[in-house]
Image (spheres, grey):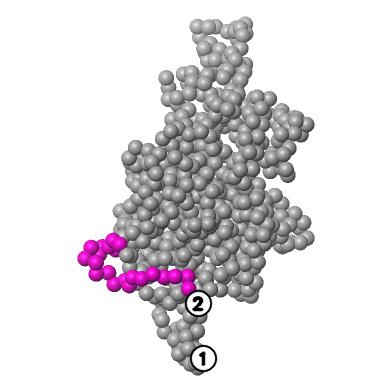
Amino acid sequence: MAAVETKNASTLPLLGLTNPLNGISERSWGNGLDRARFKNAISDWSGTPLVLSERNMIAVMDRLTDKPEWTRKVFDEDIVSKWKKEAIDMFKDEPPEKEFTVDMWDYCLAEMREYAELEKEHGFVPALEATATVFKSDSIIDAQLKEDLRAAASVLENVPESAKDWHPGSDEKVLDLVHPSLFPLLYGRSRVLKPEHGHVIGDSAGEWEGKGGTMTLDDCEQWIGKGGIMPVPEPAATQVSSWAGLSSWDRWGRSEQHFYSAKFQWLPCEVAFSDDDGVKITSYINNLQPKKHKDLYEVLEKMIAKTIPMWNATLDSTQTFHKEPRINLDSIPWIEPEGERPREEDEDPEYDDTWELDNEWREENRTLVPPGPDTYSRRKGTFAMRDSDEKAVNLRQDWADQGLQVIVKLANIHLTPEKPEYDGGAWHIEGQLNEHICASALYYYDTANITDSYLAFRETTSQEYLADKPYEQSDHTHFERLYDIASDGPCVQGLGSTLTREGRLLTFPNVLQHRVSPFALADRSAPGHRKIVALFLVDPHTRIPSTANVPPQQKEWWTEMVHGLDRVNTLPAELRAWVTDSVGDFPLALEEARGIRLELMEERRLFVRDHEARIQQESFSFCEH
């Protein structure tokens, strides 16, 4: 795969400002094998269907690599023998398609021993490795950085009750510390600085009113209110092309408007690479004032730098060609019954449905023999040898000049004896297509008095894959049993769930849907919590308007800045209040921003609904031979 051509961020077109909102390649590949963008869950992801027994293998490896000192224990034959028995016994009462065999254990052991070497070399390993991979690390974010994060984030927590921002609809269980849905980019209202290169959409003459310039972390508040109005996308710019099987019209003829938003976009910050394997956040994090929270900015810079190698592997897992399943179905897996169906005494072959009765007897008495895994050394998996034309993803190298765009979120889940349970979330991907999020990182930095919590994953799969597998005319029962699917059922497979314990960093590509599983207080007489940092990586193949282009929109920030000016600070309180109130409807007051957030959340709810509807429309259909 050819190297990615790097560019300076200031020269790149901005989707929705200088280029149409959907002005990114419809395909994830360009000429030859060049990447035009990373894959996404909406338009071009289709995972390889995996048999149930392989998904059980993935679950076993994930649970065993959660054990303390597993990198040592996996080479201890006595311990390994106990693990083997536990794994096999766990599935001993299951039907054949769910059994865990000795061959499966041997494969898992070889794979985990390679994982142990990867852990020593890289500090992270696969948690769930299928066509794409979820990675986990309990060591990349060290104890000191975790404590620094706790201390820096506590400034956001230690505020009066009236100032706490409980997420709407969470029953005061989810506390937003920094959330991108508050004060997002508003098409048709937000102020945007004039881009250095290119013309704003609809302004080919270059007469746009917006002021240009360069904001820094130190002076971003001084740019509030400057710039021109962000254009409203044309209807055509919010449509998904139909060439990839994603028509802008659903099967009932209704136009879909929720994959792209014509109203909102989350705002990323700009992240530049430094020479010492570090990064610098060069534009403000939305809803996090740089001067007030300098310590938290420094912590987040260190976290992003440490996350980048995991993002490399995560994105690479979606690009690697020819990653084979651990278990292949190469033949029809039935042992047919011997002999013939016993005939009834009064059965008349000329008039009774003899063929149907024979076939029913055959299906009831045949034995399913699930396929087993090949040897581990033959599988092309994570970090395996590549084809000569494949190039690993390297964000730091491939986008050295351009840098990255990252959306930041910090949130806490608080449970109390009065509200002891968290119900979990819905299946979703991060963002709409406006944000072009290609990968996520979740860091669980503080957990107290809650039961084990898991993050579940699923993906859309290929209906063509099974159509090429062996089956007899009108007989695809083995597909349904081995893959846990139904004919005419949706092309979706669950990949399992992974533990989200304190100190763990998870990364995963945005081709996978995920869902927070329910959890509760461990001791229901005392409160408990879970605190999370989420980092969402914008696909670096493109550029979206960021906090380098959009001055802060918070009226509170502007008020603090203006009241700090000598000529305003000396005014009587009544006049200072008049100055604050005289600015009109921009910048935005907090209460209005919260109302806008509700609109954004409703639109994203419709996006989740539309995505789910599209997933359900794609179904397994086994053609007649």
Q: Which mark is residue 573?
A: 1
- Residue 571 in view of the camera: yes
Left or right placement of residue 301 versus residue 64 in this view: left
Percent position (x, y) of residue 236? 30, 53
The C terminus is located in which quarter? Answer: top left
Amino acid bearing label 2: Glu
Outermost residue, front direction? 275
Residue 454 belongs to the span the image colors magenta: no
Percent position (x, y) of residue 588? 45, 74
Spatial CA span between label 2 and label 1: 16 Å
Percent position (x, y) of residue 80? 73, 32
The correct choice, above or below, for 114 with respect to 425 in the image is: above
Please state which of residues 492 and 129 is positioned toward the viewer in this rendering: 129
Dominant SS of magenta comes to loop
Residue that numbered label 2 is attached to: 556
**Residue at 78%, 60% in the rendered image:** 525
Q: Residues within 10 Å of mark 1 (few under 14, many from 20)?
A: few
Q: Residues within 10 Å of mark 2 (few under 14, many from 20)?
A: some
Where are the magenta residues, as a range?
A: 197-218
**Residue at 58%, 62% in the rendered image:** 299
**Residue at 63%, 28% in the rendered image:** 107
